[in-house]
Amino acid sequence: MDSEQLSLQIKLEASSPQPETVECLGMTFENEEARRAYFTEKLREKLQDPDFRKIEGFPISEDKDILTLSDPPYYTACPNPFIKDFINYWKQENEQKKSTEEAEKYHREPFAADVSEGKNDPIYNAHSYHTKVPHKAIMRYILHYTEPGDIVFDGFCGTGMTGVAAQLCGDKTTVESLGYKVQADSTILDEDGNTFSKLGVRKAILNDLSPAATFIAYNYNTPVDVV
């Protein structure tokens, strides 16, 4: 190998993305594959519990099919046994960020406004599943009633627009597209200039009886490396 080829190889190796560790539920893994393997084994163990399989709505399926479709702990093609772990972890994470006074002074007036959002957004038109709701319409409610880090539960999530909305509450451009103004300190002002919320991602727990819906919801709310 001549010097030019060696130099090119060194540059390519230096520019190639290095594997990053992954954190999940307070645990650190070498990569996503290691995280998935660990929690898949935990799910496999849970599937051996007869009481777990008696949960209403449990799919009529072989274990291998459930495990193949699942991406635990984030998404499972059966009742998710990790939900309690997420709630406890997020709650602890939120308590560390908020003082006791901030946590106890929660107060919101009823949301009273006409909500009308167009259906031409690329996110809305990404699939043709029925009963979709524009994520920007949901964002208005989430921003009004919650703070960053709060947990939002949607038990009839459909294709996961609530999850999309919860994540985009942390996106300044999207929030401002609703007609709101985001200040330098991340506080959000409404159309009348009144402070009513704060910029930041909310945590969403999504559930639906339809396997097709939850599968779409999972993919809608999973980060994708497009590079």
Image (tube, rainbow, N blue to C red):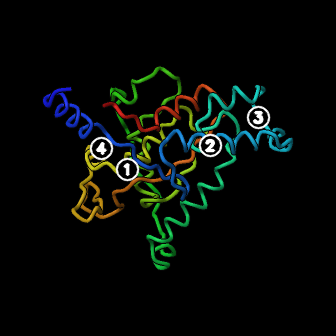
CA separation in Å, label 4 and label 1: 8 Å
Residue 169 image label: 1
CA separation in Å, label 3 and label 1: 32 Å
Q: List x then y, in percent, for residue 20.
A: 40, 47
Q: Which residue is mark 2?
A: 155
Q: Which residue is mark 4?
A: 174
> Does residue 122 lie above or below 13 as drawn?
above
Q: Secondary structure at mark 3?
A: loop
Q: Residue furthest front?
A: 1
The part of the image, by quadrant, that contains residue 156 is top right
CA separation in Å, label 3 and label 4: 37 Å
Q: List x then y, in percent, for residue 133.
A: 46, 34
Q: Secondary structure at mark 1?
A: loop
Q: Is residue 216 left or right of residue 2?
A: right
Q: Nearer the viewer, residue 131 or 84?
A: 84
Report the amino acid beneath label 2: Gly
Report the amino acid beneath label 1: Cys
Which residue does the image show at 49% across and 41% down from the upper left? Answer: 32
Looking at the image, is mark 3 or mark 4 nearer the viewer?
3
- Sequence-wise first label, 2 or 4: 2
- Sequence-wise first label, 2 or 1: 2
CA separation in Å, label 2 and label 1: 20 Å
